[in-house]
Amino acid sequence: MTSVHAQYVYIDIPDTTLEFNGDYFDLDLNNDTILDFRFIQYQDTGTTGLIDHSIIAPIDSITSKVYGRQRGFFFYVDKLNVGDSISFSSNPWQGISSTDFYGTIEYRFDSVSDPYSQWQDDSEGFVGLRLTKNDSLLYGWVRIMIENGEKLIIKDFAYQSKLDSAIDAGHLWISIEEKYLSGHKGFVSQDKLILTRPKNSSIAKTSIYNSEGKLLISGNWVEAKWSMPIHILKTGFITVVSESKDGIWVNKIFIADQ
């Protein structure tokens, strides 16, 4: 587990694949030892044996909510993208039926997806989640992938530990503001990304993410200067995150089209 500043907490888990009928995974969203949601994969079920159904069910069916809405016959879980806001003002929070107490992620009959599902065609995205804690609301997300309507893969998740506060879907560093740390600079010069800091600084675990929150580079920053060719980075904004005994430095840098 990785704890994040700005009240974001990110939990990385080994990818968990549900692929056999009845496979399930229980999620403790805010890491308080109380289980909050259950993901279930149904395979070749129904009277015809032709139904594949991926669902999420709240373990506390009264207060837990999923970002989504009713479409057709089902209460569907919306697929969120990186940067989508998850908060009280986010609408709607109707991804779980109030009578059946589950939300549909993907539904297929005889290998054909229901047209109202947003998780078709080997789709990866984020599920927005909401809990009630101490008469306040806690928001988070979980990243999942549906493969061919037959496998549900849970990859990682995060939550906003500050109650009644929003969180954006996607990697934890995408949504936070830059953090200043004395003597630290990042810039592009010709064909290189250059990072500088004071001499004798502590070894810093440093990671670089693209605008989608995907990790591009990770390593230990040892010397005062660290440079790398920009051709290994994608065009657009990157986020540099450096953590050491000296503090945390977060810097967003634009990489122009190369």
Image (tube, rainbow, N blue to C red):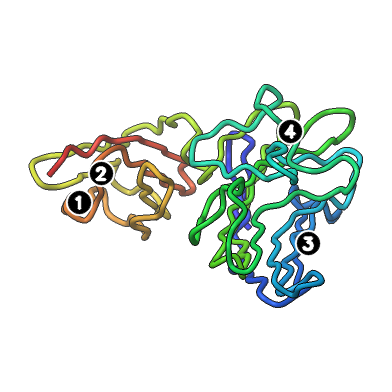
The mark closer to the camera, 4 or 1, is 4
For residue 155, above or below residue 255: below
Q: Secondary structure at mark 2?
A: strand
- Of tags 4 and 2, the one toward the viewer is 4
Q: Which residue is mark 1?
A: 227
Judging by the rendered image, the residue that carries numbered circle 4 is 93
Secondary structure under the numbered disc 4 in the rendered image: loop
Comes first in the chain, label 3 or label 4: 3
Q: Are marks 4 and 1 in contact (CB under 8 Å)?
A: no
Query: 258 or 248: nearer the eye?
Result: 258
| Mark positioned earlier in the residue sequence (3 or 1) | 3
Give percent across and percent down for residue 257. 15, 40
In the picture of the structure, the residue carrying the numbered disc 3 is: 26
Q: CA distance from mark 3 to mark 4?
A: 20 Å
- What is the C-alpha distance between the residues marked 4 and 1? 45 Å
Residue type, numbered disc 4: Trp
Q: Quadrant of the C terminus?
A: top left
Q: Of the residues shown, which amino acid type is indicated by label 1?
A: Ser
